[in-house]
Each structure stands twice: as C-alpha cells, then as structure tokens.
Image: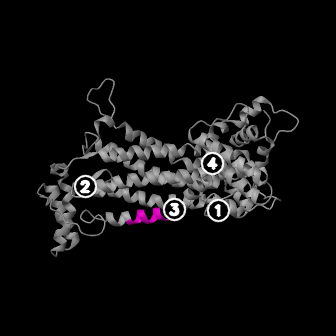
Amino acid sequence: MKKLWEKNYEVNAEIERFTVGRDREMDLYLAPYDVLGSMAHITMLESIGLLEASELKPLLAELKEIYALCQRGEFRIEDGVEDVHSQVELMLTRRLGDMGKKIHSGRSRNDQVLVDLKLFTRHELSEIAEDVKALFDELIEKSEQNKDVLMPGYTHLQIAMPSSFGLWFGAYAESLADDMLFLQAAYRMTNRNPLGSAAGYGSSFPLNRQMTTDLLGFDTMNYNVVYAQMGRGKMERNVGFALATIAGTLAKMAFDACLFNSQNFGFVRLPKECTTGSSIMPHKKNPDVFELIRAKCNKLQALPQQVTLIMNNLPAGYFRDLQIIKEVFLPAFDELKDCLRICAYIINNIEVRKDILDNTMYDAIFSVEEVNRLAAAGMPFRDAYKKVGLDIEAGTFTPDKNIHHTHEGSIGNLCNDRICQLMDATLQGFGFERARAAEAKLLS
C-alpha cells in the first residue's frame, strides 16, 4: 500500500520494518485524538473555503463513526498502512472517494501527531488527577480515623520520637497535594494548540488557528510555529517529571507499608486477599502488591530522563528520533493509574495496630517529651537533655506517655482540613471542563 509520502520507488522492506518499529502499535493510543484533531481541522478548512459545506458534513459524519470505532476498541491499523493518520485518511477515502483526500490540506503529519499527543496527554492527565484525588481522599480518611493511634517515628531507622498513624497517612496525602501542583503545570503546558504549525514552518493557506484552538478546547495555541515543533519531546519530558513526582510519593509509601507489614514491625496488616504465599513456606503472606508498586513507580521515575536522553541536543525541526519517545511515554499513564488505583484500594482496607507503644522497647521515644517537660519547668534545655540521657543509660528513665502536641501539623493538630484546601484549590485550577465541553460539542 502506498505511503502518503511515497514517490516512484519502493522502500527496502527491512528498512521499512526498522523505521516503522512499534509506531503502529503506539498509534492505537492516539487514534481517537487523531479523529478529533481532524474534525476540528476540516471544520476550519471549510470556514476558509478549502472545503465545501457539502463535503464537510459527510466527512464529519464518517469521522464520528471512526471515533465510535475507537471508543469500542475496534479500530485497527491495517497491514501495509504506515500509521494512524494514513489509516484514518484511507477509511475516509474508501467511503467518500477523493473527498477523503482533502483533509490533509494545510497540515503535516508533524503537527498532526503533535495535536494527537497533546489531546491524548491532557485526557490522561485528567484521569491521573482524578486517581490522585481518590487516593488522597482515602489517605485523609485513614488519617482522621487513626489520628489518636500512636506509633514510633524513626530517624536513621532508629526509634526517635512519638508519631501517629494520623501523621503517617496525612503526610502522604499532603505529598500528593504538592504533586498535584506539578501535574497542573504539566497540564497547562500541554493544553496549547500546535495545529497549523504544519512541518514547523507554517502554511501558505490562510489557516484560522484560533478556530481550531477553540474547537478543541485548548487554553491557547503554541503561537510560534517553530516552537510548536520544538515542543515535541519537551512536553513529554515535562509531563514525565509530573508523573515521576507522583510515582516517588507512591514508591516511598510502598516501602513504608512493606516495612510496617513485616513481623519485625507488625504495625499494619494488609488484607489477606491482597497478599501472596510461598511455594514452600506455609506461613507467608507477602506484600507483593506494594513491592510491585514500588518497582513500577521507581521505573516511572526514570521517564523524564529517558525522554531527555532521546530528544536531548536535537536542533530545531523534526527528527525521527522523536518517534521513540512514544514507546516510553504513552504506556506510562496506564501504569501509573494502575498503581494509584491499587494503592487506594489497599489503603482503604489496611488495618493498623493500636497498641504498638505498649511495648517497653519503644519507651525511649518519649525522652524528648521529658526533656521538654523539664525545660518548660525552668531547667536549662542542655541540663535537661543531659539528665534524661543519663537516666536512660542508667535504666531509670520512666516515660510519660500522655503527650500533648498542639502546634500546626503535629500529632494533636493534623491540619488535614488545610491540606484538603490545598488540594481542592489546585484541582480547580486545571480547567478540565473547558476541554471536555469542547470535545463533546465537536462530537455532537
């Protein structure tokens, strides 16, 4: 089957295999967004006289059919067809004849894949944001439920000071609130329209780029056509950093959960249906879920570096190197969503132990409380520190476990309501509704 760019010679079959690589497989992620971009583009072409109104209507109708095919998971790129753009144009041409060949006027596959990637990414970021919020809500709920349940805090993996499950769960909730700021920045940089930049140098057609920007629900366009092409790779790297920071939070929490679930700690109990066993040790209930979350999220933290190393030091303009970015970038969203959803389920069902600090091995964590009590009663802090230290060495230290912390963010004042306000304010700043409304209108 001829390629869009094919002249009067055929490409060597082995060269074609190598250059196409996994692109057709990766393009299945982009198919519905390629259709949306084409719908906006041809609507604009009709407005500037490059399509007749009598042509626009059947083209839009067929594109809606192809979109529905994508949504049902039935869209396929046929053998011999190079990419998603060629497949969509081929399907239109089969149904509508030469009319289908007109949809490429005023654009290149370069800006076509750019807009596909932008539309795909903003959709995926909205789903990631929803999943982050769902896990956040589970953590806040667990924090409130267990705000009075004490546990040891550690530094250097040595018992240090009293903590609580309210603090532990709440800490990861606030971490996600900060991660959401990265996600919002990534979304806002993503939600700019590159369509109309063509191969990176614009078009002699009088394109109405503001019209396609509005039709697709972008906040603004990438104005400079050279920069629009330079954004390929840069967007993926920036989004990769946002995904990586969420993954970092999950990986750290997963490590804590594995540690706290072990018999040497015994602070938490995972639901037995969420653990796995051993082929020879009948007592084992392994935290494989958290171990896999940790591994997957550590892998995701390499994403921005992978993208950077593929696109680094390329001059302005398009290069085939950029195709390889899709292979590491597009699947990353499903992997992170999977980790977020599994993590939310486990956190909802995790059980915490309420009598941990009854064990005398943790008595020393109350030493700072005693030092502070003596200092508050008038003893110089250094003298109080020395006295309590000597009492511990002599084995005469008796802890007072009735602690009372009141400052913001402490055991007795978690500030979960303020953490929720931070999360809500960030979520409101995305503006997902604009994009969703534009896409719905285009498909109506």
Q: Judging from the image, what secondary structure is the residue with disc 1 in?
A: helix
Q: Identify the residue position indicated by label 4 in the image.
A: 33
Q: Identify the residue position indicated by label 3 in the image.
A: 430
Estimate how packed mark 1 is, as few (under 14), some (14 to 19) or many (20 or more) residues with alpha carbons within 10 Å: some
| Displayed quadrant of residue 365 | bottom left
Residue 12 location (% of width, % of height) = 80, 31
Q: Identify the residue position indicated by label 2 in the image.
A: 145
The range drawn in magenta is: 421-429
Measured in 3D between alpha carbons, the distance from the residue under mark 1 to the one under mark 4, in whole angstroms, is 15 Å
| Displayed quadrant of residue 285 | top left
Contact between labelled residues 4 and 1, with CB atoms less than 8 Å apart: no
Q: Earlier in the sequence, mark 4 or mark 3?
A: 4
Q: Is residue 314 visible?
A: no
Residue found 69% across the figure and 64% down from its top: 210
Residue found 57% across the figure and 37% down from its top: 73
Amino acid at circle 4: Tyr
Contact between labelled residues 3 and 4, with CB atoms less than 8 Å apart: no
Q: Earlier in the sequence, mark 1 or mark 3?
A: 1
Measured in 3D between alpha carbons, the distance from the residue under mark 4 to the one under mark 3, in whole angstroms, is 20 Å
Q: Is residue 438 left or right of residue 391?
A: right
Amino acid at circle 2: Gln
Foreground: disc 2 or disc 4 = 4
- Answer whether residue 426 is magenta in the image: yes
Q: Residue furthest right?
A: 8
Q: Judging from the image, what secondary structure is the residue with disc 4 in?
A: helix
Q: Earlier in the sequence, mark 2 or mark 4?
A: 4
Placement of 36 over or under 376, stated as above or below: above
Q: Earlier in the sequence, mark 2 or mark 1?
A: 2
Amino acid at circle 1: Asp
